[in-house]
Image (cartoon, rainbow, N blue to C red):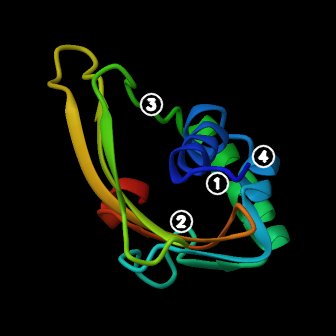
Amino acid sequence: MSRTPQQIFEGYIYAGTVTRNADAFAECFTEDGVFEAPLVPAGAVFPRRLVGREEIRTAMAAHYAQQQVKGDRAPNFEKSGYVLHTTADPDVFIAEIDTVFDGEGGEEDRAVSLVQIFRVRDEKIARLRDYFAPDLVS
């Protein structure tokens, strides 16, 4: 039985956003998988384009280590949500995501909306385009 878009997406979120495990994150992708963040400017700290599982693993490990040093907040999953949209192409689905970060020290909660387009092959991510506001990772 093949994995559904829901299962692929949830595995990706768990590996990246929940556990920040670069090895598990990279294993969500095909060997030649591509991760793109087209709205991130060239030269930014967050990777704009990664090609191949090993490049994804290395770059995301560095990114997660930097997040730990900076003390970046994790999302509040109870307040956050998403909707998956299937397409006419069974290998493509779209995730529409609203992520909420709890406010600290009297600050208001911060909501972030983004869209991700997934192309899968053999139940792994072959290409992921992640559209989010680039100032979130600067």
Question: 122 and 97: which one is in front?
Answer: 122
Mark 2–mark 4 Cα distance, whole angstroms, equals 19 Å
Where residue 80 appears, as percent x and y from the top left, is: 31, 31
Identity, as a three-letter code, of the amino acid under mark 4: Ala
Identity, as a three-letter code, of the amino acid under mark 3: Arg
Q: Earlier in the sequence, mark 2 or mark 3?
A: 2
What residue did someone put label 3 on? 73
Instruction: Relative to 17, say whether 101 is above or below.
Output: above
What residue did someone put label 1 on? 63
- Quarter of the figure that contains the C terminus: bottom left
Mark 3–mark 1 Cα distance, whole angstroms, equals 14 Å
SS at mark 1 in the image: helix
Identity, as a three-letter code, of the amino acid under mark 2: Phe
Q: Residue at x 51, y 71 (%)?
A: 90
What residue did someone put label 4 on? 24
Where residue 124 appears, as percent x and y from the top left, is: 71, 63
Where residue 56 appears, as percent x and y from the top left, is: 73, 67
